């Protein structure tokens, strides 16, 4: 059971960066107007930011977010001993984007850096990894960069994927502080559902070939190529509304808390109907559950930090108790309780 | 059954009230698609505490099939 607490690690600040280019699902004319209305009502996604042909990568967005955050927190770069990059859209197969970012950000060569390949659950997984290492090693400061540019893998003629995903990245600064309250984390995985959200071609099992680009109609309104992101909406829905509440209820029991114990429940921004089903099952009132998906869509591992920065920015100066929950591709899901105070959240950067 | 249909019609805002019957075929509902399927999954979960799988839902052809599926899952809990 991957349930544990991490002492002495404090969240100092979060910054996010998104591409300037905005696309609206109201203009998604691949589907009928009636379908568009129902899609927006059900998924909640109205607008998304996309890198389009700008050439921007997740690492570029993450770097802009990190630079802004380091500046606003007056952080001495020499003090950063660990950099973790969470993404499924890295710059290269190899080397790891985290290592490239160590240099580009001007961090010390004494800084350890590695990537984590996770999506929707990735922010919480990233927190667990960087927090554990920092606490064990008594590192002064650490930088967690998480995000994705999922739109790059989405085919426009696949209505089950294209209108859902937006691009973005986040940077979170953590620091060692013996006076801070512990964070508690619960992590789960179920690889039996690996095909629920998948990009089939381009890895070593199915290397990219000409056929990887062949777009075929799978069902009405769903055409895609094997190189595209594929999503089985109903299976993901079933998984999310079943496993997520089970995990969080178990978390409540183990931590002796309830929905009332938290100021905010910040969920991965997957789909409004799905998230609302989870929210209602867990008994969180609507005002405790912020949404950024209307403006940004599903931004994968950036969605939890992006929701904090976009929706809670004016509230983070006071002490807050937050429950974070990410779930999706893997399948993989994770919950964390964190206490913040004077969290520094600069305005969202547009590139 | 009547209650189930009323709930469905309340959720499917784009479908005129009173048009669904137990024998209505899902694919005959105007504009029926994956969003409606998600709404059915959410309804089954919140109102009947039943988690339907995508494959189970795909087998249901009519409103009656849907209703039976939910009842059957509820009974086997």
Image (spheres, coloured by chain):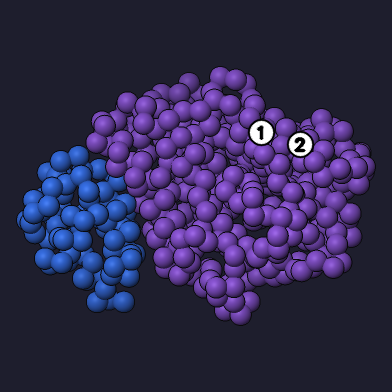
Chain colours: A purple, B blue
Which mark identifies residue A68?
2
Name the residue located 27 percent from the left edge and 50 percent from the top edge: B37
Name the residue located 26 percent from the left edge and 48 percent from the top edge: B36
Q: Chain of mark 2?
A: A
Label 1 belongs to which residue? A349
* Quadrant containing the N terminus of chain B in the rendered view: bottom left
Nearer to the camera, A112 or A212: A112
Q: Percent position (x, y) of residue B60?
A: 19, 55
For residue A77, what is the image quadrant? Answer: top right
In what element is the residue under mark 2?
helix
Q: Is residue B29 left or right of residue A88?
A: left
**Residue A105 in the image: above or below residue A234:** above
In what element is the residue under mark 1?
strand
For residue A217, what is the image quadrant? Answer: top left
* Quadrant containing the C terminus of chain B in the rendered view: bottom left
Name the residue located 13 percent from the left edge and 47 percent from the top edge: B16
Mark 1–mark 2 Cα distance, whole angstroms, equals 8 Å
Name the N-terminal-most of marks 1 and 2: 2
Q: Chain of mark 1?
A: A
Name the residue located 38 percent from the left edge and 53 percent from the top edge: A273
Q: Percent position (x, y) of residue A267?
A: 53, 56
Q: Percent position (x, y) of residue B75?
A: 24, 77
Q: Percent position (x, y) of residue A173?
A: 77, 49
Q: How many marks?
A: 2
């Amino acid at each position: 059971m991957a349930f544990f607490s991490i002492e002495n690690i404090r969240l100092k600040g979060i910054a996010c960066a998104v591409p300037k280019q905005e696309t609206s699902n109201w203009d998604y004319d691949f589907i009928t107007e009636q379908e568009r209305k129902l899609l927006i009502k059900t998924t909640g996604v109205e607008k998304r930011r996309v890198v389009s042909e700008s050439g921007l990568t997740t690492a570029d967005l993450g770097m802009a977010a990190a630079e802004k955050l380091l500046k606003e927190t007056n952080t001495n770069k020499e003090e950063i001993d660990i950099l973790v990059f969470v993404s499924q859209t890295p710059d290269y197969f190899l080397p790891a984007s985290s290592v490239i970012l160590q240099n580009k950000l001007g961090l010390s060569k004494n800084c350890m850096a590695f990537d984590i390949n996770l999506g929707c659950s990735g922010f919480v997984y990233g927190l667990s990894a960087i927090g554990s290492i920092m606490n064990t090693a008594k590192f002064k400061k650490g930088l967690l960069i998480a995000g994705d540019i999922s739109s790059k893998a989405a085919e426009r003629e696949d209505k089950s994927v294209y209108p859902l995903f937006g691009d973005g990245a986040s940077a979170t600064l953590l620091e060692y502080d013996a006076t801070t309250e512990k964070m508690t984390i619960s992590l789960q995985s179920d690889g039996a559902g690996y095909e629920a959200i998948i990009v089939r071609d381009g890895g070593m099992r199915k290397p990219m070939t000409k056929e990887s680009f062949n777009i075929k109609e799978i069902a009405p309104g769903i055409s895609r190529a094997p190189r595209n992101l594929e999503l089985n909406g109903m299976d993901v829905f079933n998984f999310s509304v079943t496993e997520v509440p089970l995990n969080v209820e178990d978390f409540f029991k183990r931590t002796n808390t309830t929905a009332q114990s938290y100021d905010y429940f910040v969920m991965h921004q997957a789909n409004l109907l799905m998230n609302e089903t989870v929210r209602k099952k867990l008994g969180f009132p609507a005002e405790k559950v912020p949404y950024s998906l209307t403006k940004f869509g599903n931004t994968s591992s950036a969605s939890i930090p992006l929701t904090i920065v976009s929706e809670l920015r004016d509230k983070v100066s006071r002490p807050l108790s937050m429950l974070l929950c990410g779930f999706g591709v893997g399948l993989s899901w994770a919950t964390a309780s964190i206490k913040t105070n004077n969290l520094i959240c600069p305005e969202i950067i547009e590139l | 059954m009547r209650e189930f249909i009323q709930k469905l019609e309340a959720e499917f805002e784009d479908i005129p009230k009173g048009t669904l019957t137990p024998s209505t075929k899902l694919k005959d509902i105007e504009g029926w698609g994956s969003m409606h399927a998600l709404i059915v999954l959410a309804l089954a979960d919140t109102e009947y505490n039943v988690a339907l799988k995508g494959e189970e839902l795909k087998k249901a052809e009519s409103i009656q099939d849907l209703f039976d599926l939910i009842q059957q899952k509820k009974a086997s809990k």
